[in-house]
Image (cartoon, grey):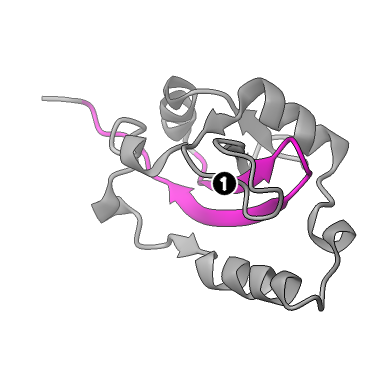
């Protein structure tokens, strides 16, 4: 899910005290790649299921891939994990689906993965607890 859409997804900035952003780790991997310490096969290793999810339900971004530099190639794929969900998580295809899942009684965590379906670059972008939505008054 895009960051600007979090409020619509029932996950406001105020409710996400447990958010973890992995930009520093991403930058470290990209730095090692650019220095030649990591090869393209080391950083472009997306699992076929992740590539399929990126093509079919990925949330497009305006960013170019940091590896192949293809314009507008990056997408975000969101997975939700929690009690009662498959061990491999549930791929979230829309904001409405995330809102429905947020209404569940159990606690859920969302993992957002940055993926380039062209070259296979992938990196965990951020995680956050899925906050329960409150009824509108």
**In this rendering, is residue 19 above or below 8?**
below
The total number of labels drawn is 1
On the picture, is 91 further left or further right than 42? left
**Could you tell me which residue is drawn at 28 percent across and 51 percent down?**
13
Provide the residue span drawn in magenta.
Answer: 106-135
**In this rendering, is residue 101 above or below 15?**
above
**Could you tell me which residue is drawn at 52 percent across and 31 percent down?**
60
**Could you tell me which residue is drawn at 84 percent across and 59 percent down?**
40
**Could you tell me which residue is drawn at 52 percent across and 56 percent down?**
126
Depth check: give the residue in front, 31 or 125. Answer: 31
Residue 49 in picture, x, y percent from top left: 82, 33
SS at mark 1? Answer: strand
Q: Give the farthest residue toward the left.
A: 137
**In this rendering, is residue 135 above or below 34?**
above
The C terminus lies in quadrant: top left
**In this rendering, is residue 51 above or below 21?**
above
Residue 92 in picture, x, y percent from top left: 58, 29
Residue 57 in picture, x, y percent from top left: 62, 24
Depth check: give the residue in front, 88 or 54. Answer: 54
Q: Main secondary structure of the magenta part?
A: strand
**Residue, disc 1:** 112
136 magenta-colored:
no
């Amino acid at each position: 899910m895009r960051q600007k859409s979090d409020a619509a997804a029932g996950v406001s900035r105020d409710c996400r005290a447990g958010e973890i952003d992995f930009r520093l780790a991403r930058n470290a991997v990209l730095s090692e790649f650019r220095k030649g310490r990591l090869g393209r096969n080391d950083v472009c290793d997306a699992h076929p299921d992740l590539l399929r999810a990126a093509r079919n339900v990925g949330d497009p971004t305006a960013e170019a891939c940091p590896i192949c530099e293809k314009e507008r190639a990056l997408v975000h794929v969101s997975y939700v994990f929690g009690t009662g969900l498959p061990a491999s998580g549930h791929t979230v295809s829309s904001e409405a689906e995330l809102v429905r899942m947020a209404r569940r009684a159990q606690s859920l965590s969302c993992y957002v993965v940055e993926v380039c379906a062209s070259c296979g670059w992938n990196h965990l972008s951020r995680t956050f607890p899925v906050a329960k939505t409150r009824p509108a008054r």
